[in-house]
Amino acid sequence: MLPPEIIASFFGIAVLLALSPGPDNLFVLTQSILWGRAAGLWVVLGLCTGVLGHTLAVSVGLAAVFAASQTAFLVVKLAGAAYLLYLAWGALRAGKVSGNGARPPRQTGAQLYRRGVIMSLTNPKVTIFFLAFLPQFASPARGSLGLQMLMLGVLFMLAAFLVFSALAVFSGSVGERLQRSPNVQLWLNRAAGVVFIGLALRLLTSER
């Protein structure tokens, strides 16, 4: 089991990491502005599910494969970049449709949740980060390392959920006001498309 001081220190660091600018923050921000607070919260749930997936990967040793294999890392990285470019294409296309006076169809909760899961799981750097980060707070003297990793992953997921949910609520409220203007909706979609392209390029150029 993890002692209270380890839990407190890890949770504090996890909150700071969740607050620091990164792909997940930008993803929550853009989706919440485009689709509203509820949509942003669905994305947050998806991202947190992805965090659990990374935690399980570390616990069973899959993260070591990504750290050691350039091919495995490259395959997942290309898949993630391709998905981001797909989202960019959809956002830019929606922008053109909005400009002609037709509002793009609203995404369902399941679609947004799936976006969050895929966004998280197709970023191999998160798994490798967990491989380097989580073991610093675990010790064989406290029992099962796998169980400790799982507990740390749940704590990280909780910290991410709290921070990202606050971001979704705030940005979603702003987005719902902005969406009343068709011209603003057009530029919001275009901006989201540019952000997704930027994230894809960042992932493509990233190293292990």
Image (spheres, rainbow, N blue to C red):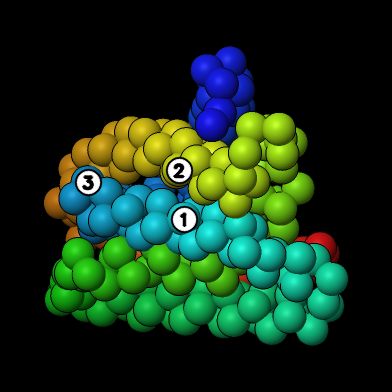
Quadrant where the C terminus lies?
A: bottom right
Residue at (68, 36) in percent of width and height: 138
**Residue sitting nearer the eye, 187 or 55:** 55
Which of discs 3 and 1 lies nearer the camera? The answer is: 1
| 3 or 2: tag closer to the N-terminus | 3
Quadrant where the N terminus lies?
A: top right
Residue at (61, 57) in percent of width and height: 59
Gap in Å between the C-alphas at discs 3 and 2? 24 Å
**What amino acid is found at the position of numbered circle 2 in the picture?**
Val
Numbered badge on residue 154: 2
Residue at (22, 46) in percent of width and height: 37
Q: Residue 21 occupies which quadrant of the picture?
A: top right
| 3 or 1: tag closer to the N-terminus | 3
**How far across and how far down the image is residue 8, in percent?**
53, 19
Is residue 164 positioned above or below 183 on the image? above
Is 107 positioned to the left or the right of 84 in the image? left
Which of discs 3 and 2 lies nearer the camera? The answer is: 2
Badge 1 is on which residue?
52
**How far across and how far down the image is residue 91, in percent?**
38, 72
Whether the residues at callouts 2 and 1 have beta carbons within 8 Å, the answer is yes
> Can residue 178 be seen in this snapshot?
no
**Residue sitting nearer the eye, 120 or 156:** 156
Determine the secondary structure under disc 3.
Answer: helix
Numbered badge on residue 8: none
Gap in Å between the C-alphas at discs 3 and 1? 23 Å
